[in-house]
Image (tube, rainbow, N blue to C red):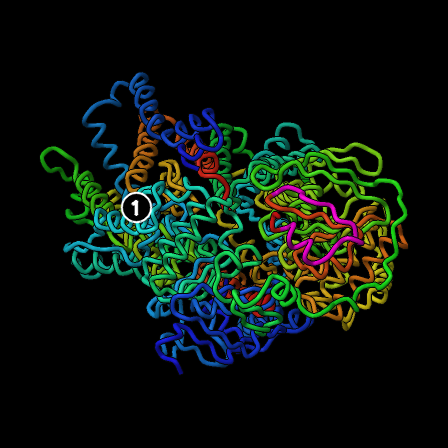
Amino acid sequence: MSAISAAKTKGAVHAILSFAIENLQALGIVGMIIVFAAIEPHFLTFSNAMTITQQIGILAIVAIGESLVIFTGNIDLSVGSIVGLTALVLALVMAATGSVLLGVTAALCTGIVVGIFNGVLVARLGLDSIIVTIAALTWGRGLVQAVTRGQPIRVENAFFTYLVDGKILGLAFPFFLIVIFYLAFYFFLHRTKTGYHIFALGCNEQVVINSGINSGNLKIAVLGISGLLAAVGGIIAIGRTASALAITGQGLELDVIMAVIIGGNRLAGGKGSVGKVLLGVLFVGLLSNGLSIMAVPGTVVQMFKGLFIILAVLSDRLAHGRES
Amino acid sequence: MKTMQSHTIHKLPRLNSLSQRRLSKLVLPSVIVVLLGIIALTTPRFFSQDNFIGLARQLPILGLLAIGITPITIAKGYDLSIGSVAALSIMTTGYIIIVTDSLPLALLTGVLTGALVGAFNAVLIEGIGLNAVIVTLATLTAVRGLDILLVQQNYYTFTEKIRHLGLLWVGKGLVIGIPVSLIIFTAIALLLSLVLGRTIFGRKTYAIGNNEKAANILGINTRWHKGLLYVLSGAIAGLAGIIALGRIGVVTSAVAEGWEFQALTAVIIGGTSLTGGIGSIKSTVTGVFIIAAIGNLMTLNQVSGYYQAALTGFVIIIAVLIDKYLSKRIQD
Amino acid sequence: MLLDYDVLKVCAVSKTFPGVKALDRVDFTLHRGEIHAVVGQNGAGKSTLMKILAGNYRCDSGEIYINGKICDIANPGVAAELGVALVHQELSLAQFRTVAENIFLGREPVNRFGMVDRDRMNRNALELIDRLEEANIFPNNHIEDLSIAEQQIVEIVKALSLEPSILILDEPTSALTLKETERLFTILRALRDTGLGVVFITHRLKEIFQLCDRITVMRDGKVVETLTLNETDEHTVVNLMTGQNLDSYFVHDQGTVEPTDVILAVAGLTLPGKLNDVSFQLRRGEILGITGLLGSGHDLIPRCIFGIESVKPKVRCLGRDIRIRSSRDALRAGLGLVTENRKDEGLFLKMTVLKNMTLLVLHRVSRTLVRWIRRKKEADLATEYIDLLNIATPSANAPVLNLSGGNQQKVIIARWLMKDPEIFMFIEPTRGIDVGAKSEIYHYLHKIARTSGKGIIVSSTELQEVLGISDRILTVYNGHIVDDIPRSAATEELVLTRINGR
């Protein structure tokens, strides 16, 4: 419950606790910045800030798509595999035609198609989004591994490298990408009718149906957008590594969900904001960056990621209560 | 409230008896078996003793994982961490056997490793009440990270191959031509099947999966019970790791990737419903056979192993669809 | 057809669900500018009729005319267009959204850029709220921060914003205080005077006479009668509501209960917001009835005692003081509870009749060491009780799903009979059950109490049932026990009066 209602019904202590939890991420971010800067001064430099922007580029964009799905009360566990799949498609088309336009279009289409496929299974056939997207996670990754046979497929093209390394006015290109996408989706989620309906769906599906809104189409739409944004992530991934790998995007879904929840959005849906997603992404990004600057090995980071997800769900439970 | 759906459901004939439902449950496995049979007949090397032995050696590991998660899936829980658990158990068992050369101790370690992770899951999911899918996915990640880390840290210890004959025998040995691992699997499967089907514990498991609210009212401590089921699935995954270690012969962390999804597929395809309360060890074993056969046939026909994973994903969808379809008709 | 007179005309509408005929050729009219009460027991068909009008269901046969034109209410969207607005019994709002967002869900006003015009939305919402002269609710409030009464007003505002010609309210006052109810009535009367047709579903006698112009009584999917309220009196209405005489289905000479030991004593039971200082005693061999209006909390009393609500009461049971923290404690103390919704909280629908029955007594049919269930013993036990209670099932291994409501309830009763607690508690024991099975169940209840010397508590909203079976009746109003009526003094009117607070 919100801090206000907590204050009304459960008294001062609960209200303070709720407030702290609601703003934990912001406090956490501030705390992290202080701790990391103290341990490693390089952390607090402009160039590192740009590095962070580059590192969180994929996470930030895919997280927006995931948050849409979560806001409706569903979940998309296939985004990592979609990133890998779309990167693969891009690499293959580039290898065959050399055309950036064709490659990007193919990648984006792949993402949308997979997303809509998942959406149809959920909306029209009534399957649970968890299972449908786990299945997609499996078959998506399987396809990627099958086609690449463990070998990277190189993509040598300045366009993609620019996406990651390019700079405009000294600011890294991903920075602009993030700004554009977050602004766009801010308007979409918080200013349009569809955005309103997305949140309402996460609150109470029956009310949405009774209000004459097509809840099935909404679900298909959000999963489609999630797929699309994962495809954008796949394109950026090509920029990062100049190749499509079998493991591109593996494990991303957990990072993304963690970011969304740590930001303070309700896991069960209905409540949240684009700003909170950004907060969560920053949190995860700062954490990863800080740990890597301190030369913490990847395996330890992975362990911590797992634990962090648990902390994230825990804080979600405390802040937002059980799913009723 | 079923609004639009109620209109279409009326047109379908009702499944009126449990036996009818049981028969329908056999549809998917039967169809697949027939298809596989056809493919098998066109694959000459399938029906050879060598192939069967290889199959029989591979099967128990996946089989153990699958029957391990069967009880918790029946109770409407999820355990997606078992792959990483098996991997971790490989490491801990390997460590103990290299360092102490004691088979009983190593076996105990492996199972205990799994049980501990299971208990961790149990506390988070049933104790605090967090979402089972997310928690076990998180555990999957964290434990995998831990495993890789510890294997790296103890690099020198693990470069040795496993020399303990007992352990190798568990993984690769034969008894009158039958792999030891298969015997172990059969024994555990039988035991679990009896527990689920004939004991009070098993009855409670089905009740919880069927209607947790009602089970609580009738005095069953559902949280405690489900917690135990998480420990059980962890422990059995630990056992699977031991056998895997015996088979591979060396400790490595590059194992068991994606096994949890294969195991879940086997469970669903065999007939255990994700809507809870329905399923059995027998049906899971059928599912395991099917998955193993699919993999085997693919390998024999020189289809890349990677496509298997892809297929698994699609199979999950089909299995869940059929399960949903059947549940809808029966729950009307 | 009086095109200008009736805003709604329902002709011979029927609706059947698998196994049950919910509506049987129902005729119903709603005049312009009237408040029309619709009453009936649970299962009478009121909800189904309203859901058809709201577009959630479609009728199987019959016609519906709105403002003189024949209509096919295909879905909620169409219903809204036709001018039908339904305020549900269970609040259906989007909890985390604001008042304005809820009111205009699906119809949000947009500016020329296609974006939601939040200012206009809030202004319109404020205007609508003001029309009801409600000063405490603001468009930017989040629903989760509002009280139940305030949430209900939001629902009404939302319904009214559709400019309906027909407003349907389903048990709107069950969670309201007297003052809030008064407010609601003032609003409704004003609306009626502007020509709105209001359908008011309720059980509350007082409200019917206070507010409504006409009343339609439904029973078993049919309309029993429609009356104009200022041409009739409470007595007639009560008789219509309670329906045909079920006397013959009860045990004729219930006999008197010998004063015996108290087996259950409850004191000061309080459930914040629902029950207040409930105290009573139950004697051996006695059947104690507890009744009240919907929302009075009477059904919560057995649930609290059994430990499945949030309060952990201390009771004196069979001579010992016990704190009941969970159903396990309750079971150990010798209590048993049959809840009112067997599908949700009683039955294991995918399991067989046999397995549903023996769940509480498995230790009796198993070998202690390994807890191995002895199938033959279990089957024999089940068969015994199937015969005893005359449960109609092809076999003990039939899925319990296929049994009729009455037989399903018997399975649950058999389950508890097997367990044999000292105190049996039932909530709505014969809900949704045909008359024949009802009668059988009443006989068992009587037998359990008298012959076996158990204590029985029956919590029910069916007046005839409570009157027919209880040795004493506790009437509950607004969470308090307001009277303790012995059988000899119990009449329909007295009980109805008490549960309405007078």
User: In front here: C230 or C357?
Assistant: C230
Quick one: SS at disc 1?
helix
Give residue A309's position: percent from left, percent from top. 44, 37
Vertical placement of residue C337 versus C228, above or below: above
Residue visible at 39% across and 66% down in the picture = C33
Q: In which quadrant is the N terminus of chain C drawn?
A: bottom left
Residue C446 quadrant = bottom right
Instruction: Pick out the residue farthest to the front.
Output: C231
The residue under label 1 is A64
Name the foreground residue: B243 vs A187.
A187
Q: Residue A252 is drawn in which quadrant? A: top left
Tell me, yes or no, whether the highlighted magenta stretch contains residue C492.
yes
Q: Residue at x 36, y 26 (%)?
A: A28
Tell me the chain of label 1.
Answer: A
Residue C196, by quadrant, is bottom left
- Residue occupying image coordinates x 88% and y 56%: C255
Residue B307 falls left or right of residue A263:
right
Magenta span covers which residues? Answer: C479-499
Label 1 crowding class (10 Å Cα cut-off): few <14, some 14-19, many 20+? many
Q: Residue furthest bottom?
A: C1
Q: Position of residue A89 (x, y in %)?
A: 28, 57
**Residue B42 part of the magenta segment:** no
Residue depicted at x 77% and y 73%: C394
Residue type of the residue flagged with mark 1: Ile
Residue C226 seen in render = yes
Q: Tell me where residue A223 appears, x and y as whole percent.
A: 35, 56
| Location of residue B134 with respect to A115 vertically, above or below | above
Residue at the far top in the pictured view: A38
